[in-house]
């Protein structure tokens, strides 16, 4: 029998597509006919001014919000609800306060009825990767903000999702902790083939973590920039669109 941890590297990233996506919360839609094709296995950073609809787009990709018009596709299949295939990571952690670190990380596996021993092994492996082996028995309130975000990351990845949707996960961290988390995430993302959509309002973070940077504004996609190694003007090109 293969274990989840052995299977995890074989995960294939989802292709996520927004087609003429229109949605909002009241009369005036936040997104108006947005088209975006996210490649399987890429890290797409989504940048945009505050209020431009980054979180709205992410919730639509997750299946938390239904489009008023247009649609979201995952591997060509219309997204109609949330799915364990598409894991969300939020800015404020959403860990269950009464469960230990280890049991928080095991949660997606419990929900999928993965046997206990396999669950334990997968949680231990991800906790090691985010440097929290020693903290496995602690409760969320006993952790720093950066540690809680690492638990959230481990929890999201332990479920071997095919897409990870991250909404400004480091937005509440102090700059030093944030820089450490960015380094960690870059390393961890190299080990997973999941598609990652990473929302940030920080252009430098977008360029550091993204294979591509999508800039949204005015309810639509403004531009998508490939993050090559040689282009010195990337930052200016993103800032121009914000
Ligand atoms: N639950 C909600 N109810 C009503 N309006 C909302 C809600 N969430 C967001 N909005 C509005 O939708 C717009 C886009 O919000 P959001 O997607 O959160 O932007 P961003 O994440 O880019 O800052 C904003 O004008 C915001 O006020
Ligand atoms: Mg937001």
Image: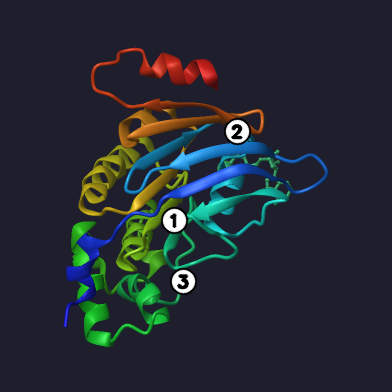
Mark closest to the chain's N terminus, 2 or 3: 2
> Secondary structure beneath disc 2?
loop
- Relative to residue 23, is residue 36 drawn left or right? left
Reply above or below: 11 against 69: below
Q: Position of residue 122 (x, y in %)?
A: 23, 72
Inspect this view and state whether residue 110 appears: yes
> Secondary structure beneath disc 3?
loop
- Indicate which quadrant contains ligand 1: top right
In three-dimensional space, the C-alpha distance between marks 1 and 3, rounded to whole angstroms, equals 31 Å
Check disc 3 and report the residue beneath it: 96
Q: Position of residue 59 (x, y in %)?
A: 57, 53
Reply above or below: 79 against 116: above
- Relative to residue 66, is residue 156 drawn left or right? left
Report the residue at 24% width, 22% height from top: 229
In three-dimensional space, the C-alpha distance between marks 2 and 1, rounded to whole angstroms, equals 29 Å
Q: Position of residue 235 (x, y in %)?
A: 39, 18
The residue carrying pointer 1 sits among few (fewer than 14), some (14 to 19) or many (20 or more) residues within 10 Å by Cα, namely some
Q: Are marks 2 and 1 in contact (CB under 8 Å)?
A: no
- Relative to residue 27, is residue 160 drawn left or right? left
- Residue 232: which quarter of the image? top left
The residue carrying pointer 2 sits among few (fewer than 14), some (14 to 19) or many (20 or more) residues within 10 Å by Cα, namely few
The residue carrying pointer 3 sits among few (fewer than 14), some (14 to 19) or many (20 or more) residues within 10 Å by Cα, namely some
Q: Looking at the rendering, in which quadrant would you find the N terminus?
A: bottom left
Check disc 2 and report the residue beneath it: 50
> Of 139 and 95, which appears nearest the observer?
95
Q: How many marks?
A: 3
Q: Which mark is residue 75?
A: 1
Q: Is mark 2 within 8 Å of ligand 1?
A: yes
């Amino acid at each position: 029998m293969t274990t989840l941890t052995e299977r995890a590297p074989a995960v294939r990233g989802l292709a996520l597509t927004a087609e003429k996506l229109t949605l909002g919360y009241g009369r005036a839609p936040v997104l108006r006919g947005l088209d975006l094709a996210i490649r399987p296995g890429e890290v797409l950073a989504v940048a945009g001014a505050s209020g431009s609809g980054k979180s709205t787009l992410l919730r639509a990709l997750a299946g938390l919000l239904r489009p008023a018009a247009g649609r979201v596709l995952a591997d060509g299949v219309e997204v109609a609800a949330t799915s364990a295939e598409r894991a969300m990571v939020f800015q404020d952690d959403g860990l269950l306060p009464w469960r230990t670190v280890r049991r928080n990380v095991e949660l997606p596996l419990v929900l999928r009825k993965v046997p206990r021993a396999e669950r334990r092994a997968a949680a231990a492996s991800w906790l090691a990767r985010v440097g929290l082996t020693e903290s496995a028995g602690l409760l969320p309130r006993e952790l720093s903000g950066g540690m809680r975000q690492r638990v959230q990351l481990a929890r999201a990845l332990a479920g071997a999702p095919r897409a990870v949707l991250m909404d400004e996960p480091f937005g509440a961290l102090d700059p030093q902790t944030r820089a450490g988390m960015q380094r960690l995430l870059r390393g961890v993302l190299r080990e997973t083939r999941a598609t990652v959509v990473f929302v940030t309002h920080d252009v430098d973070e977008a360029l550091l973590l993204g294979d591509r940077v999508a800039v949204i504004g005015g309810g639509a996609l403004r531009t998508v920039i490939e993050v090559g190694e040689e282009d010195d003007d990337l930052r200016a090109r993103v800032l121009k669109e914000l």
